[in-house]
Image (cartoon, grey):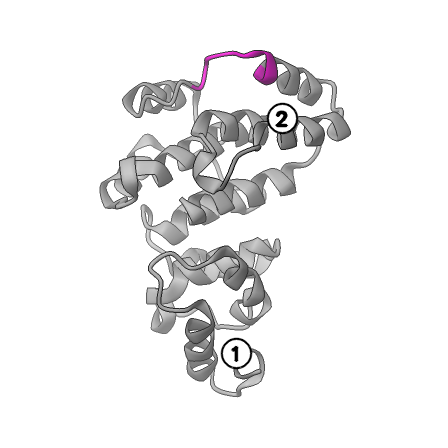
């Protein structure tokens, strides 16, 4: 209750943090739980240190307009910026290779996994140039261009805007024991097919979730 209705935003944020727990990686269900409480925290430099997890929490519920308020608070290359780069609608222009490089430099995830998901998400959304995509694909060994029977099918379903078939094939591609089984290549094909089939909002939220969960 304090996380949602306390009159002091600092107290609300403290309650949100308590709900998130002490783990370095906030459990996804806790982020969902606090999504609308996170949306009520003012976008301010005062709370900039918590911008990334707040943005991640908001985007679990598709609250992209609320998350957009933090665009002027986050710095290019940090985690909050990365989630907004894929999560916001009508992003202004493309994302530069230099911005991705700044994120890569600060990425402490195992094997730069979050950078891999950022590149895959941006490529699937069409928010980086083909040159930038190819450069990072080679640099991170993402293998985005490799085709399989599954990737061909989901690409074709996206091209003919068959949203139902894209959703079914997305489920096939995401089978695994846990999120760690997700690969940047699978994410790229899923995001691209979702966008082409008219489900760009879902594509954006999934790309943001991939970066948040790393």
Q: Residue at x 46, y 14 (%)?
A: 145
Q: In this view, does 69 lie above or below 190?
A: below
Q: Residue at x 59, y 67 (%)?
A: 36
Extreme-front residue of the structure: 177
Apparent side of residue 181 relative to residue 65 in the rendered image (left or right): left
Location of residue 47 in the rendering, given as x and y in whole percent from the top left corner: 37, 71
Location of residue 156 in the rendering, given as x and y in whole percent from the top left corner: 67, 15
Extreme-left residue of the structure: 105
Extreme-bottom residue of the structure: 7
**Main SS of the magenta segment?**
loop
Task: Report how far apart the C-alphas of labels 2 and 1 lie in the structure.
Answer: 37 Å
Q: In this view, does 129 lie above or below 76?
A: above
Location of residue 198 in the rendering, given as x and y in whole percent from the top left corner: 71, 32
Q: Residue at x 46, y 24 (%)?
A: 185
Q: Is residue 169 above or below residue 18?
A: above
User: Would you say residue 197 is visible in this rendering?
Assistant: no
Q: What element carries label 1?
A: helix
Residue 3 circle label:
1
Classify residue 35 by image quadrant: bottom right
Q: Which residue bears the numbered disc 2?
A: 193
Tell me the quarter of the image containing the C terminus. Answer: top left
Which stretch is magenta?
Answer: 144-151
Tell me the quarter of the image containing the N terminus. Answer: bottom right
Query: Does the magenta run of residues contain 110?
Result: no
Apparent side of residue 205 relative to residue 146 in the rendered image (left or right): right
Q: Is mark 2 on a helix, strand or loop?
A: helix
Query: Does the magenta run of residues contain 147?
Result: yes
Crowd band around label 2 with a 10 angstrom C-alpha radius: few (<14), some (14–19), many (20+) = many
Compare residues 26 and 41 and report the one nearer the observer: 26
Location of residue 29 in the rendering, given as x and y in whole percent from the top left corner: 54, 59
Q: Are marks 2 and 1 in contact (CB under 8 Å)?
A: no
- Decide which of tag 2 and tag 1 comes sooner along the chain: 1
């Amino acid at each position: 209750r304090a996380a949602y209705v306390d009159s002091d935003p600092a107290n609300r944020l403290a309650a949100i943090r308590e709900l998130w727990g002490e783990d370095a990686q906030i459990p996804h269900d806790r982020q969902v739980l606090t999504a609308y409480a996170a949306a009520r925290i003012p976008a301010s430099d005062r709370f900039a240190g918590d911008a990334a997890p707040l943005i991640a929490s908001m985007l679990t519920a598709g609250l992209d307009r609320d998350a957009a308020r933090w665009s002027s608070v986050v710095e290019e290359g940090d985690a909050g910026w990365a989630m907004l780069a894929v999560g916001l609608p009508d992003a202004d222009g493309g994302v530069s290779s230099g911005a991705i490089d700044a994120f890569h430099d600060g990425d402490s995830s195992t094997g730069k996994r979050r950078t891999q998901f950022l590149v895959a998400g941006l490529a699937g959304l069409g928010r980086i140039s083909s040159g930038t995509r190819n450069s990072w694909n080679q640099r991170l060994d993402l293998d985005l261009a490799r085709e399989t029977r599954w990737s061909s099918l989901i690409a074709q379903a996206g091209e003919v805007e068959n949203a139902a078939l894209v959703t079914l094939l997305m489920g096939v591609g995401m089978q695994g024991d846990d999120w760690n089984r997700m690969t940047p290549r699978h994410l790229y094909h899923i995001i691209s097919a979702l966008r082409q089939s008219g489900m760009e909002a879902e594509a954006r939220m999934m790309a943001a979730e991939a970066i948040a969960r790393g």
